[in-house]
Amino acid sequence: MARIGRRRFVMTAAGALAALATAGDAAAAPERSSAHRGHGPEREFRGMWLATVANRDWPSRPGLTAAEQRAELLAHLDTAVARKLNVVVLQVRPTADALWPSPYEPWAQYLTGLQGQAPGWDPLGTAVREAHRRGLELHAWFNPYRVANHTDLTRLVETHPARVHPEWVLPYGGKLYYNPGIPEVRRFVQKAMMDAVRRYDIDGVHFDDYFYPYPVAGQVFADDDAYARYGAGFPDKAAWRRDNTDRLVREMAERIKKAKEDLPFGISPFGVWRNAATDPLGSDTRAGVQTYDDLHADTRKWVRKGWIDYVVPQIYWHIGFAPADYAKLLPWWDDVVRGTGVDLYAGEALYKAGDPAQPAPWQDPAELSRHLTLARSCSGVRGHCFFAAKEVTADRIGAMAKVVADHYPTRVLPPE
């Protein structure tokens, strides 16, 4: 079923794009191009994240009419076409809620301003349909465990699963999270996400970097009770937590393949697995956060085991940044995917370009273009994904325009 959907997308892309005459050159049909690395026919992932949490990218604010929300969404898709991108990664489950009529979780508050209130249309269904009309893939981006950006359960709609099962929830760092150590939680979040996978002709399933939460100084993620109940046989809590995250990833992969055999499953982790000083297999970095140790996410293992189809490490640092140098991290990830069959797409910090709070390299419009040039020397890199849609549109200092001018002469198809 998934294979039929993806073939349909490829075959109809040229016709759909030809209809976008007003987009001019950007609307040219995707081609097989050798532009990326200069040898033979080539496909390439050219993506952008479209974040909905806290109305980061879309909708621009809660409470817009259905027509206004739809118009903004289509404008983002048209921008992706104009920038010669081919994948939009849409956040459809930002905080244990939904941007589709889910039988398991409430409508996201970022649509109407009220959690649980129907927006009067189906954002995910529209996004899939309109993306395909434009020759774009639409990957559904889910956040597994974040429940709310506050700690007050009573602010959630009364029927919210977190209120029905308060024992599933832990406050931490000013937010609410489902406890990954409870098997019922893991089963529930998978069921909730798989509803969208089964019902929509999406082109990929995407997780970001949030598993166990990022550490907050002076605070404790209070999962001792769950560890006492379920942690027998593990040497310590950290190993048990990593196993919980492994189970989520492995089980979700199995569910996806059972439902739609050819539907890709990708994850976008924080860019540093472990520093070499911590583990000789780690990268030549001195990052303050290591996903293996701090988020209890063994991202390298998931690639090496083939549990995921693609990985998009968030390598959100400039070339030459001493604690985490882009020029060192990208080859490290290239080595990780070698021989695995897992595609590597580099996550790019477009949001930093032109931000006055960022160091000098990010004030140079050519910084991101240099990232793509460097990627040509890494055989496993099959594309890039830009954070995020708002910056793809605004392009504060022209960094995205330079990427397009230097590296995207024509539209191309994404990797199969």
Image: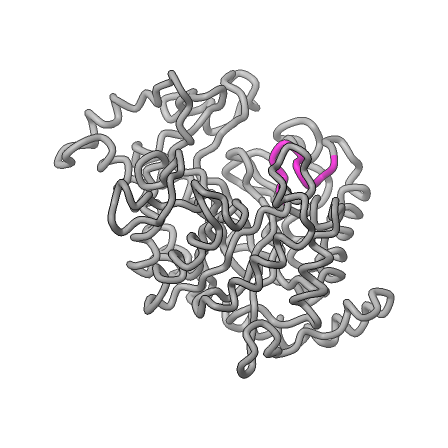
- The percent coordinates of residue 74 (x first, y second) are 76, 52
Q: Is residue 122 visible?
A: no
Find out whether residue 70 is within the magenta segment: no
Q: Main secondary structure of the magenta part?
A: loop
Figure colour scheme: one colour
| Depth order, front residue of 414/360 | 360
Relative to 3, say whether 332 is above or below: above
Q: Can residue 112 be seen in this view?
A: yes
Relative to 55, say whether 409 is above or below: below
| Residue at screen point 36% across, 36% down | 295
Picture quarter containing residue 180? top left
| Residue at screen point 44% across, 46% down | 271
Tell me if 351 is positioned left or right of 323 in this view: right
| Depth order, front residue of 331/310 | 331
| Residue at screen point 36% across, 29% down | 179
Find out whether residue 54 is within the magenta segment: yes
- The percent coordinates of residue 170 (x first, y second) are 39, 22
Residue stretch rendered in magenta on the structure: 50-60
Tell me if 63 is positioned left or right of 140 in this view: right
Relative to 188, say whether 258 is above or below: below
| Residue at screen point 84% across, 69% down | 24
- The percent coordinates of residue 185 (x first, y second) are 36, 35
Tell me if 288 is positioned left or right of 3 in this view: left
- The percent coordinates of residue 67 (x first, y second) are 81, 44
Relative to 234, say whether 31 is above or below: below
